[in-house]
């Protein structure tokens, strides 16, 4: 049976407070690789304890996985369900990807945008950017922007735990089309790739795949040797429009900024499925799926 995973990021552990036997009596203990050792015991934050013990009905002796969302994955066992005490059994660290994946998802109606980022997280997306497209029916303005972003973050956390990932995707603030175009120009200049999924694109996915494989060949090969660039790793971003499509003006802005238009097959995909399909294909190109 696969052990359930719980993210401890933002769950009551200040980053500068060590987890040790002196601090283990407090839910304010920190959680980091340097503060952990096999055999030590500490208390889970109250929210995680409730989720594990109350909701998932885990009891004494049951195993679980804990992660900081930054690559750290700890296998532990519950020693006292009522107190939320766990004992560390194994400590692992998953390296950052050599080539990262990003999804720029337009706000879409009927929760299709949330479906997209949920599946993208399960597939392995590393960065998610909400996009207020010209044809987006859903609007993140004023207080709605904060609430919308919080809802997306909750979705990313839940999907990360469900898929047993030890890396929580980065969630950026929402951008409008002009802001996004300026941002595209910047990241392309740094060596990243931005692909706009569009039904009128003239370049096939196969053609783009070959170019991407060659462009990031060195990063992919060094990843096989255990070498990564961490925060500096190049990223391949995919842009997905809303149900009404991407406007001609937006296409012009993005192309001028350095984005590439691509067509995936003959069928038109929904806003909820286009991104996950593209990301799945990209995982093969960058060597995550053999």
Image: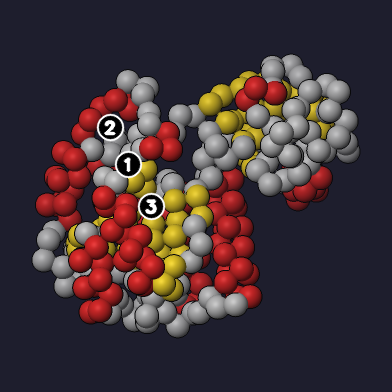
- The label on residue 219 is 2
Label 2 CA crowd tier, 10 Å (few <14, some 14–19, many 20+): some
Secondary element at tag 2: helix
Disc 1 + disc 2, Cβ < 8 Å: yes
Q: Position of residue 281 (x, y in %)?
A: 27, 49
Q: CA distance from mark 3 to mark 2?
A: 17 Å
- The label on residue 102 is 3
Res 101 visible: yes
In the picture provided, is 20 more to the left or to the right than 32?
A: right
Question: What residue would you read off at disc 1?
Answer: 234
Where does the C terminus fall, quadrant-wise? top left
Q: Position of residue 7 (x, y in %)?
A: 64, 42
In the picture provided, is 209 more to the left or to the right than 87?
A: left
Residue depth check, mark 1 versus mark 3: number of the one nearer the observer: 1
Label 3 CA crowd tier, 10 Å (few <14, some 14–19, many 20+): many
Residue at image position (69%, 18%) is 37
Residue at image position (31%, 77%) is 245
Measured along the vertical axis of the image, is residue 82 above or below residue 102?
A: above
Residue at image position (17%, 56%) is 205
Residue at image position (38%, 31%) is 229
Measured along the vertical axis of the image, is residue 225 above or below residue 278?
A: above
Is 146 in front, or is 111?
146
């Amino acid at each position: 049976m696969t052990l359930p995973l719980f993210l401890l990021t933002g769950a009551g552990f200040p980053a500068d407070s060590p987890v040790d036997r002196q601090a283990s009596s407090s839910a304010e203990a920190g959680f980091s690789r340097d503060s952990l050792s096999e055999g030590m015991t500490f208390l889970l934050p109250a929210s995680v304890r409730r989720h594990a013990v109350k909701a998932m009905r885990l009891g004494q002796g049951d195993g679980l996985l804990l992660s900081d969302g930054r690559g750290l994955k700890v296998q532990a066992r519950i020693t006292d369900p009522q107190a939320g005490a766990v004992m560390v059994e194994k400590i692992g660290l998953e390296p950052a990807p050599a080539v990262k994946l990003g999804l720029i998802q337009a706000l879409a109606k009927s929760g299709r945008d949330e479906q997209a980022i949920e599946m993208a997280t399960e597939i392995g997306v590393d960065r998610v950017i909400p996009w207020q497209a010209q044809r987006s029916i859903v609007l993140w303005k004023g207080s709605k922007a904060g609430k919308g972003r919080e809802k997306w973050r909750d979705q990313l956390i839940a999907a990360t735990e469900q898929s047993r990932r030890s890396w929580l995707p980065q969630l950026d603030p929402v951008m409008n089309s002009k802001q996004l175009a300026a941002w595209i120009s910047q990241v392309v200049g740094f060596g990243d790739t931005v692909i706009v999924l569009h039904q009128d694109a003239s370049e096939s996915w196969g053609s783009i795949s070959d170019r991407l494989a060659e462009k990031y060949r060195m990063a992919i090969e060094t990843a096989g040797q255990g070498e990564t660039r961490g925060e500096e790793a190049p990223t391949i971003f995919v842009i997905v429009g809303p149900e009404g499509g991407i406007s001609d003006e937006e296409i012009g802005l993005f192309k001028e900024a350095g984005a590439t238009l691509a067509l995936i097959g003959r069928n038109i995909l929904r806003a909820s499925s286009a991104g996950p399909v593209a990301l799945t294909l990209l995982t093969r190109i960058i060597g995550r799926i053999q």
